[in-house]
Amino acid sequence: MTVSSAQGPERGLKVTAMLADYAAAADGKLTVVGGGWSMIGPDPCPFAIAMLIEVPWHLTNQAHVVRLELIDLDGNPVTPLGATEPEMIEVRFEIGRPPGLRSGSTLPFPVPLNHGPMGLPAGSHYEWRWTVNGQAHEDWRLAFSTRPDAQSQAA
């Protein structure tokens, strides 16, 4: 699933995000492997959140924070099996203007968030929701499900 979002009434940061098997960034580009899934498991396996943040010229040379939180269908923070704290990822970044960049240009900032296996109950639904500089929007989310385990499929 891919989600794009813009922040604020004037042109702001735009975030495009996708669940993937693996993501990497090099030379300002994002490489995504196995992207676009919405079902995982039931056994824990590594995954990635591939994000491309487009920063408009007027928001360069400023600090920004993207915060992702894993929530359940009731909107509650999720603590993975074996963890002691709810799952949260925070990305702080600042992108500078290259010399000669024309006013009104947009700069891409690729963010590959690779994550190790995370234990989540089988047959459940979750969302990664994010805020940008403390602002949220109902469309800023990536929904996914965990497959039922073999035992519950046989029943």
Image: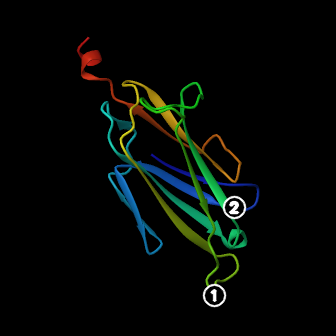
Label 2 SS: loop
**What's the residue at 59%, 65% (across, down)?**
54
Task: Say which amino acid is labelled 1.
Answer: Pro
Rendered-image quadrant of the C terminus: top left
| Dot 1 crowding, Cα within 10 Å, few <14, some 14–19, many 20+ | few
| Dot 2 crowding, Cα within 10 Å, few <14, some 14–19, many 20+ | some
Which residue is the extreme one toward the right? 9
Vertical position of residue 121 compared to residue 101: above or below? above
Question: Residue 36 versus residue 71: which sits nearer the camera?
Answer: 71
Residue 90 in percent (x, y) is at 58, 51
Residue 138 in percent (x, y) is at 64, 40
Q: CA distance from mark 2 to mark 1?
A: 21 Å
Residue 43 in percent (x, y) is at 30, 32
Q: Earlier in the sequence, mark 2 or mark 1?
A: 2
Residue 12 numbered mark, or none:
2
| Residue identified by numbered label 1 | 99
In this rendering, position of residue 16 left or right of residue 98? left
Report the mark closest to the observer, 2 or 1.
1
Residue 144 in percent (x, y) is at 44, 36
Vertical position of residue 28 compared to residue 18: above or below? below
Cβ–Cβ below 8 Å for labels 2 and 1? no
